Image (cartoon, grey):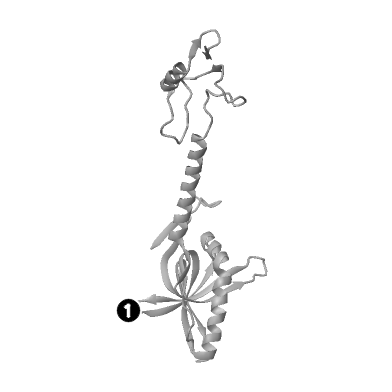
Amino acid sequence: MSTTKETQKSKGNKNDVKYYSSVHTESGFLNALTLVESEYGNDYYAMKFKAQRGNSDKPSTAAHSVRVNGVQAKEVIAQIANKVNAQLAANRKLWKANKGKDALTILITLNISDTIAKSYMNKHTGKDTLYIDGRCTSIAYVRIGDEVIFSKKETVKDEAAKDTQAVEADTVEATAQVSDDVDTSTGELAQEVTLDPTEIMVTLDPKAEDFEARKAKLKSQGYAWNGDEKAWCLS
C-alpha cells in the first residue's frame, strides 16, 4: 500500500511539498533484536527478520533489517525486548549444541515503510548478500514457539473490557446514590425538596425517574407544593 503525505507550505516556496511513503505488512521469523546506541542520544532498536514469501506450505524467505521508530512499535518492543532477547540467546546456544534442536521460533507480523534494497559483503562466502532496509512503524503480533506474547487484537479487547468495567462501575455508583428525598444526616425524609424541570439529569440508569415521576413520588410520600418556599414541603 502506498500513501502520499502533504506538508505545510515551505517558507519562500508557494508550492506544497509532497512526500511519498510506501507502507506494507510483513510476517516472518525474528532472528535479531539489538539496541543501537546513538552518540546523539537517540537510541533505537533494530530488528532482523526473514519475511515469508510465496506458497504458505513451503514459503521462501527474504532478509529484512528494519529500524523501530513508530510510536506503537517502540511501546511494544519496550514490553517484549527482554523476553525476546532471552529466547534469542537460548536459541544461539541450542544451535551451537545441537544444530537448533528444541530452539523456539519467534514469529512476528509488523508494518514497515520506506523500504529499499541494500547489500553487504558476507565475510563467510565473500559474496554480496541482499536484504531489505526499512522502518518498523507498528507491530501486530509476536509469538515465541506456541506462546503469543503480544497481539494487537488482544490489546484492543483488553482496552474495550476496561472501558466496559469503568461504565459498569459508574452505573453501580449512580444507582447507589442516596435519593434526593432523604436527609443524609438523619436518614429520614427531608423537610424540603426542590425540583428543577429544566435540569437535565445525566445518568447511566435507564430506570431513573423523570420530573413528573419525581413529583408523583413526592406527593405519595406526603409532600405538598409550597409556592412561597418554591419547594416541596413535607406535611
Q: Position of residue 124 (x, y in %)?
A: 52, 91
Please report the residue visible at 40 percent of the width from the left and 79 percent of the height from the top. Answer: 61
> In front here: 170 or 111?
170
Query: Does 210 sit above or below residue 129?
Result: above
Residue drawn at x 57%, y 76% is 86
Query: Which residue is most to the bottom?
Result: 125
User: Is residue 233 at all visible to an observer of this figure?
Assistant: yes
Residue 112, placed above or below residue 17: below
Report the residue marked by disc 1: 57
The single residue placed furthest to the top in the displayed view is 228
Residue 59 lies, with reference to residue 142, above or below; the image says below
> Residue 101: image x %, image y %?
47, 86
**In this rendering, does residue 123 appear at all?**
no
In the rendered image, which quarter contains the N terminus?
A: bottom left
* Residue found 41% across the figure and 59% down from its top: 3
Q: Residue at x 50, y 90 (%)?
A: 98
* Position in image of residue 161 (x %, y %): 46, 51
Location of residue 84 in the rendering, given as x and y in whole percent from the top left corner: 54, 73
10 Å neighbourhood of mark 1: few (<14), some, or many (≥20)? few
Q: Amino acid at mark 1?
A: Asp
